[in-house]
Amino acid sequence: MRYESWAPRYEAIRAEFGYPFEAEERAARRLAALLPEAARRDALERVAGRLRGRDVVVVGLAPDAGPPPIWRLPPSTPAPAVVAADGATRPCLGAGIVPAVIATDLDGPVPSEVEANGRGALVVVHAHGDNVDAVERWVPEFPRELAGSWAGPPRDGLLDVGGFTDGDRAAYLAEAVGARRILLWGFDAEALGEEPAEARGTKRRKLRWAFTLLEELARASPVPMLWWRRDGSLDQLQVDSAARSTR
């Protein structure tokens, strides 16, 4: 997605949640400074090398979703690739699945992401205004291939392909690099898991934005986007008030 198309959505999200642009820029600068030189080069092409032309399973962390049953998919060449959204990395590893790519803003079980990185996953670390401490704490811990992203205007060394939460941003990333199909596993706009009561309202609003952005991507892109439901069915992505769950 070109930034000109994404910018109005980014401005609307920042306005709704009160994210100061100056804080976003500070986080982006800090992330870029901490990334190794190699991580700032050719990030989109490096991601594309893992995902282009493949069925990409984007794994969310809906409660009780668990890891995707990759073995249920018909055999294909090349084989499907998994992109884990932040905390979904841990159940993937528990099932013996090392994601090809991880999209993370570092607010989940980051040690699992460090482990997956050591086992070959490319980790795309996202900077936003309130995660500078996490960026400083964790970026130096990753032993292997990294890339960085943020939601603002194009800048050297960081990706911006659109998307707000880790899950929808992972789908935007797969679409941007030419996935054959995008299969969404473990997405649920209503189930909030064990969120503290005071955080539930914000979490629900973030999820609504995530599903709105997924719907917009599905409408705009030639790449098929499908809900992969727990019963094994694959349904064309359609989002409305009555059907926002892959359960």
Image: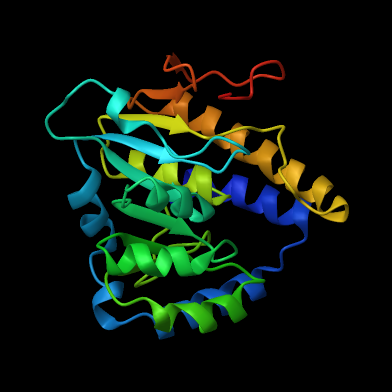
Q: Position of residue 246 (x, y in %)?
A: 56, 24
Residue at the extreme right of the image, as rendered: 198
Q: Left or right: 222 with respect to 129?
A: left
Q: What is the quadrant of residue 146 in the picture?
A: bottom left
Residue at x 53% of width, y 83% of height:
137
Residue at the extreme left of the image, as rendered: 77
Q: Position of residue 128 (x, y in %)?
A: 59, 67
| Nearest to the observer: residue 45 or residue 198 | 198
Q: Left or right: 36 with respect to 59?
A: left
Q: Position of residue 98 (x, y in %)?
A: 31, 52
| Nearest to the observer: residue 12 or residue 233 | 233
Above or below: residue 20 compared with residue 87: below
| Nearest to the observer: residue 148 or residue 133 | 133
**Colour scheme in the image?**
rainbow
Q: Position of residue 40 (x, y in %)?
A: 30, 74
Residue at x 60% of width, y 64% of height:
107
Q: Left or right: 237 with respect to 14?
A: left
Residue at x 25% of width, y 30% of height:
180
Above or below: residue 158 compared with residue 160: below
Q: How many marks?
A: 0
Confirm whether residue 162 shows in the render.
Answer: no
Quadrant housing the N terminus = top left
Residue at x 67% of width, y 40% of height:
207
Q: What is the quadrant of residue 222 in the picture?
A: top left
Quadrant housing the C terminus = top right
Confirm whether residue 201 shows in the render.
Answer: yes
Above or below: residue 21 compared with residue 84: below
Q: Left or right: 122 with respect to 67?
A: left
